[in-house]
Amino acid sequence: MAGGERPLEHGWLPDTPVGDTVLRSFAHNQGEVNAAVATAAGGRTQRTDAVLLADSGTPVPYYNQAVLVRPLVGPDDGVLDDVEAFFSGARNPATLLSIWPTPDLAARGWMLVGHPAWVLRSPGPVPDAGSRPGVEVSLVTTPEELAAAERVAVEGYPIEQAQGRPVGSVLPPALLGSGVSVRLGRLDGEPVAVGLGHVGCGIQNLCLGATLPAARRKGVWESLVWARVADAPELPAVAYTSDFSRPGFVRMGFVPVLRFTLWLRPPAAA
């Protein structure tokens, strides 16, 4: 515009407040989660006006992630050059998470993972769901508990790339106290489920959940959801989720808002 006048606000300008929309808050919250994991694992982070980058150095593609904070303008958008330069030479797969539909990025070496749903619960009191027989949820505070949570995540998600890796490959010990909460769900005293959360940027982000197959549909997963929502009931609670978990969120009052676009980039050749 003439005279350097600021463009009309559309929600994704470089100086748009983080809290302009819940979606923008989520993008920045997710970037904080990825940065916390990468920092705890001794990895790398970088941020620009267009993308939040984290390379944890772990085999989990979701922790080696580029979170877009504006839509791509085409398959040759310069932000993609920044993303690919950041992950150049990386030994583990990386992902690109976009709130918006994207152009086809296959010609650039990306593979489409899918379109996970983004669900939201408005602020409000957490319902008293009642105790479930044998179900216990606790906040992880020790390296030993974190190792147990990691085993459940690897087996329950499952995270095939992390199977057989040393302890700390998925949930490094330095994650404790990072601002990313880790909760362990037990059934009859045995660890069977894990849930991560992060309160930041005006929302509660339910950023990972996994349950061992034999313990599903016994109330552990639901208890983990409510425990994390209760960390900040005055804020919206959100998650991006698979179609497998989506019905559970909907049953608990979460609303499916839209579907994201998720791409994966294989690791660089040795």
Image: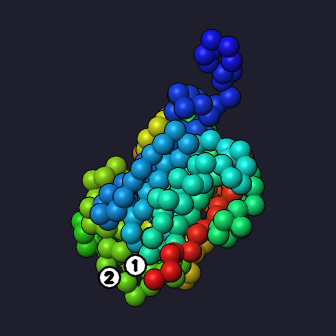
Q: Between disc 2 and disc 1, whose residue precedes?
A: 1
Q: Which mark is residue 166?
A: 2
102 shown above or below 160: above
Q: Secondary structure at mark 2?
A: loop
Q: Is residue 226 left or right of residue 182?
A: right
Q: Residue at x 31, y 52 (%)?
A: 178
Of residues 24 and 256, which is closer to you in this image?
24
Q: Secondary structure at mark 1?
A: helix
Of residues 33 and 111, which is closer to you in this image?
111
Location of the C terminus by quadrant is bottom left
Location of the N terminus by quadrant is top right
Q: Residue at x 53, y 53 (%)?
A: 82
- Res. 137 in view: no
163 shown above or below 24: below
Q: Measuring from the top left, give residue 11's x and y in whole percent.
A: 64, 31
Q: Is residue 17 left or right of residue 116?
A: left
Q: Residue at x 50, y 80 (%)?
A: 269
Q: Measuring from the top left, give residue 248's x and y in whole percent.
A: 65, 61
Q: Residue at x 36, y 58 (%)?
A: 44
Q: Measuring from the top left, give residue 166's x and y in whole percent.
A: 32, 82
Q: Which residue, given by chain and number where applicable, does mark 1 sit on?
A: 151
